[in-house]
Amino acid sequence: MVSRTFTKSPRLTKFLKFICTSLFEGRSSDINEQQIGIKVFGRSETYTAADDSIVRTQARLLRQRLEEYFEHECPDTPMIISVPKGGYVPVFEPRPAPPTPAPDVAKTALESPAVETPPADEPKRITGLWPALLAAVLLVAVAVGISLFSRNVPKTAADALWARIFPSGSTVLIVPSDDALVLFQEFTRRPVDLNEYLSGTYLTEAASPQVAGMTLNSEWFASHQYTSSADLNLALRLGRLPQAERANVETRNARALSIDDLKRGNVILIGGVGANPWVGLFADRLNFDVSWDWKASEGFVRNKRPAQGESAVYRDTLTDGMRKSYGVLAFLPGIDGNGDALLFEGTGMAGTESASDFPFSTSQFRAFAKTIGASPNFVPYFEVLLETSSVGGNAPEARVVAYRLVKP
């Protein structure tokens, strides 16, 4: 099948294939303007996105072509693909239902002929929905290079992990980092523990620096709630998992959370203890303790019980413009044995992204799952330390440094 909308646009087809494949293969860190310019449009490694608008221009065209395709070529498909403005990550979502006009009951009764029941042996007619749906699936299959039978792909250990985190019918809380808290600690050069965070007493010690004409006093910190775009992207990514569709998923600000919330179901915490103090509740169960030295402005991971060949401390380093960062992904029993917890931590944004991408990476997580004895039907509690080298905050790929199995 050839799409009239895309047949004369090989570059847009390549664009669509790249961003969709990167999303499906767990390489969302590649879906940025710099990488698209290099890998889709052949720009050099030294290409500067600020001076070349090729990606932004083509992204606008791609959004228009996708709208045209699903409006004119496949107007009846129950699923549509879009690329929201402000980014390049594709979104697969149900088509909004058109408004149904209220029928004129009296007119319908007068004008409508009597309905005849078809003979029992008359075959049912096939509606136009299936050809349209097939056309949409074929577009994705051709442009992205995936099989029409992807739903029949055997389950993996990652599926077992997601099934544990998102039990059908349960409530699952996703808690992103509190970047206003990070800002406070950077100004005061001291950490805030969970007790101070919950009581709010740390705000009484806040200095009042001037930033961009604003006074950042205790009232400012109390009234502003920020989180990173990386955390929000991860929350959206988790919410789109097939397993998550069967659960009641809520995204909750860290300040609005309570210990009782953590005891009612499963929880996903994003960010290290400096950005998400709730991680501190699990410190006694973790061997890899992600911390931040606010005086030195340096992130590090403390290895509480180093095995042979392991270091006691893993620190962020910057050499020749290349930053080495660390992330920790931990799957643990919940508070007081209630439910489960999934932690995405990092010594910085790149480290947290490496932990975020790890369970979505088919090849990496499959190899790790085999190492820890996981299967498509079972995954043990674990924590894994990851190392990534990044430029400009992006974490292209991580390697497993060490891991531990966690006792229930």
Image: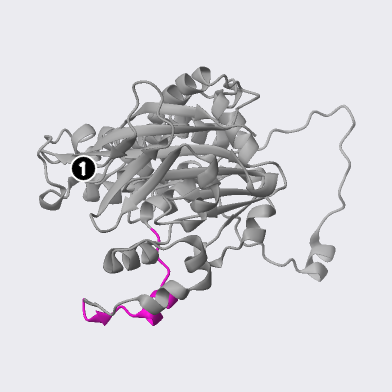
Q: Magenta part of the protein: which range?
A: 212-227
User: What residue is shown at x 34% (from left), y 68% (from top)?
Assistant: 184
* Residue 224 magenta-highlighted: yes
- Residue position for label 1: 34
Rendering colour mode = one colour
Q: Secondary structure at mark 1?
A: helix
Q: Quadrant of the C terminus?
A: top right
Of the residues shown, which amino acid type is indicated by label 1? Gln
Q: Is residue 116 above or below residue 150?
A: below
Q: Nearer the viewer, residue 330 or 124?
A: 330
Q: Residues within 10 Å of mark 1 (few under 14, many from 20)?
A: some
Q: Quadrant of the N terminus?
A: top left
Q: Nearer the viewer, residue 59 or 130?
A: 59
Q: Nearer the viewer, residue 235 or 256?
A: 256
Answer with the quarter of the image where residue 262 lies: bottom right
User: What residue is shown at x 27% (from left), y 68% (from top)?
Assistant: 187
Q: Is residue 251 above or below residue 31?
A: below
User: What residue is shown at x 50% (from left), y 51% (from top)?
Assistant: 279
* Residue 400 magenta-highlighted: no
Residue 388 in the image, given as x and y percentages of width and height = 29, 34
Q: Is residue 109 above or below residue 234?
A: below
